[in-house]
Amino acid sequence: MDLGLKGKVIVVSAASLGLGEAIGVELAQEGANLAICARREGPLEDARAKMAAHGVDVLALQADMTKPADIENFVAKTMEHFGRIDVLINNAGDAAFGHSIETPDEEWEKIFDINLWSVIRMSRLVVPIMRAQGGGVILNNASTSGHTPLPGAIDYNAAKA
């Protein structure tokens, strides 16, 4: 299938495992160059190798999407390496399960940081870049939990709503 992505620069957060890795591999097969990040370097390097095996340029950086400085560094290094960002895929997410009354503030903050604030922070940095280059696309990987809540995950459901 040709999606017209050959040579495009696509940023994918949380791309070392699961859906993020699968997205990256599919985009690499389409010829897109990638900037990927994840918290753990081992799985990140494994994912980078799988994507690069398709003959595309893959920049892989360790970054924790709950940390604004990591997000800023990831976007800055992506721009240094590629000089543009055509597509941003906000894929990072996490959930905590338990009774909302017993969930400490720190857990709520962590879930909102990864599921909501990471999207806002990444988009805030990338939108001016896309405007300056004449356009781009932002895709936010959400969840049905904002519409059909998961039992025992009120913090996650609220962050995805």
Image (cartoon, rainbow, N blue to C red):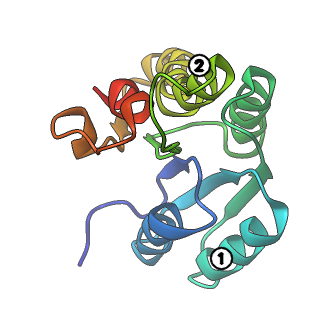
- Residue tagged 2: 125
Report the residue at 48% width, 44% height from top. Answer: 97
Q: Secondary structure at mark 2?
A: helix
Percent coordinates x, y for residue 48 in the rendering: 69, 71
For disc 2, the neighbor class at 10 Å (few under 14, some 14 to 19, many from 20) is some
Above or below, comparing residue 25 to residue 114 in the picture: below
The quarter holding residue 29 reads bottom left
| Whether residue 100 is situated above or below residue 14 in the rendered picture | above
Disc 1 on helix, strand or loop?
Answer: helix
Amino acid residing under circle 1:
Ala
Q: Is residue 16 above or below residue 78?
A: below
**Separation of disc 1 and disc 2 at Cα?**
26 Å
Looking at the image, which is closer to me, 122 or 127? 122
Residue that mark 1 sits on: 52
The image quadrant that residue 106 belongs to is top right
In the image, taking residue 94 as reference, residue 160 lies left or right, namely left
**Residue type, numbered disc 2:** Leu
Q: Quadrant of the C terminus?
A: top left
Instruction: From the top left corner, tell me how far across and down residue 70 is, in percent.
Output: 78, 31
Query: x, y (%) of residue 156?
Result: 42, 35
Q: Nearer the viewer, residue 92 or 96?
A: 96
What residue is shown at x 54% (from left), y 21% (from top)? 117
Numbered-mark total: 2
Given residues 24 and 145, the one toward you in this image is 145
